[in-house]
Image: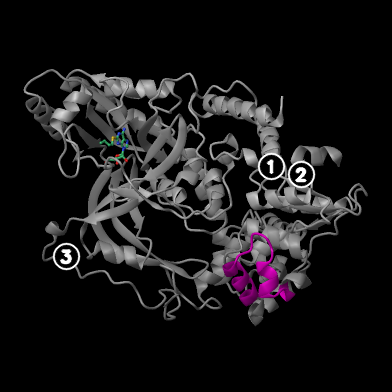
Amino acid sequence: MTPQERILALRQTLHHHNHLYYVENRPEISDYDFDQLMRELMDLEAQHPEMADPNSPSVRVGSDLQNAFEQIPHKYPMLSLGNTYNRGEVGDFYRRVSEGLGGAPFDICCELKFDGLSISLTYEHGKLVRGVTRGDGVSGDDVTANIRTIRSIPLQLPAEANYPEEFEIRGEVLMPWESFEALNAERERQEEPLFANPRNAASGTLKNKSSQVVAHRRLDAYLYYIPGRTLPTDSHFENLQVARSWGFKVSNAMRLAHSLEEVYAFIDYWDEERKNLPVATDGIVLKVDNVHQQEILGMTAKSPRWAIAYKFQAERACTRLEEVTFQVGRTGAVTPVANMQPVQLSGTVVRRASLHNADIMHQLDLHLGDWVYVEKAGEIIPQIVGVAAERRDATTGPRVQFIQTCPECGAALVRYEGEAAYYCPNASACPPQLKGRVEHFISREAMNIESIGPETVDDFYERGLLPHHDAADLYDLTFAQLLSIDGCRERMAQKVLDGIQRSKEVSFDKVLYALGIRFVGKVVAKTLARHFRSMSALREATYDQLVCVEGIGQIIAENVVAYFQDERNQDFIARLTAAGVQMELPEEQKLSDTLSGKSIVISGTFTHHSREEYKALIEQHGGKNVSSISKKTSFILAGDNMGPSKLEKAQKLGIPLMSEDDFLAML
Ligand code: IVH
């Protein structure tokens, strides 16, 4: 078999296993074997650039080229659906359809309404050629490169399937709850703004400029409509079953209803059962099943007359707004909080709701004493979604204003460019900021001083046991001081001191995180610690040196430099150092000379260790890690998603690639 033939064979095999895994949920080979085949394909493709194919299964990993989205007109306009909110309106729809069809019998195809963003896919000769967003319905963004990374969207339909030469299929791109939660958890660690719900996350992701980022975010897609006239059968329902046989992911939660009662039964069932689905849904879509009957009914300017959406009721309550208070966090950010008369909502009593920031608060136009609607966003956090302005009367108070000075320390608030939040700039004397920083310092992921909790910090602060108002004061606490606190017995005092003592062993990267430098979350702290190795080296680092470190952007670099310039922080670090807190990472132990004299480039993403860990491993075995590929590079430690430009360069210079597993085996 020639390498070219092998490439074609591998592609076919990988398409097949991809479908089994992502669409049918019944893999036949292990992830490991799949990865081996994929690696072989990618290696061969790198050696044979003439065989490049945009639909190769290897494109699933995305590219680090920047996508520019071209506007593409839709062949058939992408309409939206009329909405209904109760049984009565569903009944009205059913009767309108019946009248429109002159009393002829008809079936309704009942489907879930997936809460993502709609997408139109075009296939020619069984190959995916284009993916376009809805846009304004007339034309949308060409997001093909990103679409190709979605594993459940087939790039190549099986040869034996009997599909039209050219056809379009539409559906919804969405982010499963699991991916959504993982993504937000990661963003929280990185101190990046969270996505409010899976729909926003899916839409933000699909419009991301890097398909590599998209590939990491694990989107999914359900297909639910084939427009045009080249349809396999007269039944929408049947057509989708056929599309499933072509390899598309079509929901199993789809039923033909022969009566209005059957439609209601479907709605009732899924109103409850949807809570167990792995993806977000916000309603039911009802479609007249017969495509000829669809044509008879036709469309209005905005939506088809043959289909309608029934929206699930978000659980909602109405209660009175008593007061808006303002909370100051450790970073000084001020968050408005609505305090309401307690009300029952989806099984819990709700009293408070975050208003997020000044803009969101003002949009709601809240007045004291207003009746407000509260909903659970994504069924998690309560949110005020609106005001019953018609219920205002003489007892209603004035419009709620955002404060101008800090409620805790009186400093004038500031707003930084491009940020939604107001901040109290008085970082060195505003009590909740001071206490917040100490609480952050002792937290589990930082110095892990378990014997102290937030209330204890508050107590220490109020009693003047933290004279510099920072966490370094903890290391000066004495047994006698602790015993002077009411209710603190000897055993307790000893436990607190032991906990503080133990924190001196906590590694430098965690100490760095514990400082609470803005935008330096756990991951960034680790990166900085591994790169600079000591607090003194980091303190000396310039902005330019910082931005050269992989994973360190401009904002982080600016904040790090500013932090070390502040004399109070310098003093704080000096006192921590004097107390014996770890201010450097231990020397890497030399493990072997296996890599002595070797220059190694690390590229891509890895499964067993992080990049920083590989860097350390290379050094421990006598090698040198370099950042760019040159003639002198000995080999490339290549993970997943290695960028195409790097790949090309490596190939041109004849630099070998080594996989993660081979590398570890060698060591
Ligand atoms: S059919 C002409 N089916 O809901 C018919 N749409 O408000 C076109 N949606 O833009 C749409 N699940 O993004 C259809 N099973 C489903 C759907 C669905 C979600 C979305 C779609 C559409 C919006 C209409």
Which residue sits furthest right? 593
Asked if labels 3 and 2 touch by Cβ distance under 8 angstroms, the answer is no
Q: Residue tagged by mark 1?
A: 46
Which amino acid type corresponds to the residue marked 3 in the rendered image? Thr
Q: Residue tagged by mark 3?
A: 396
Q: Magenta segment, which residues?
A: 539-563
Which amino acid type corresponds to the residue marked 1 in the rendered image? Ala
Indicate which disc, 2 or 1, sits on the residue closer to the N terminus.
Answer: 1
Q: CA distance from mark 3 to mark 1?
A: 70 Å
Q: CA distance from mark 2 to mark 1?
A: 10 Å
Task: Classify mark 2: residues with Cα within 10 Å, few (<14), some (14-19) or many (20+).
Answer: many
Give percent across and percent down for residue 184. 50, 49
Q: In what element is the residue under mark 2?
A: strand
Give percent across and percent down for residue 14. 60, 28
What secondary structure is the magenta-colored segment mainly?
A: helix
Q: Residue tagged by mark 2?
A: 657
Asked if labels 1 and 2 touch by Cβ distance under 8 angstroms, the answer is yes
Indicate which disc, 3 or 1, sits on the residue closer to the N terminus.
Answer: 1
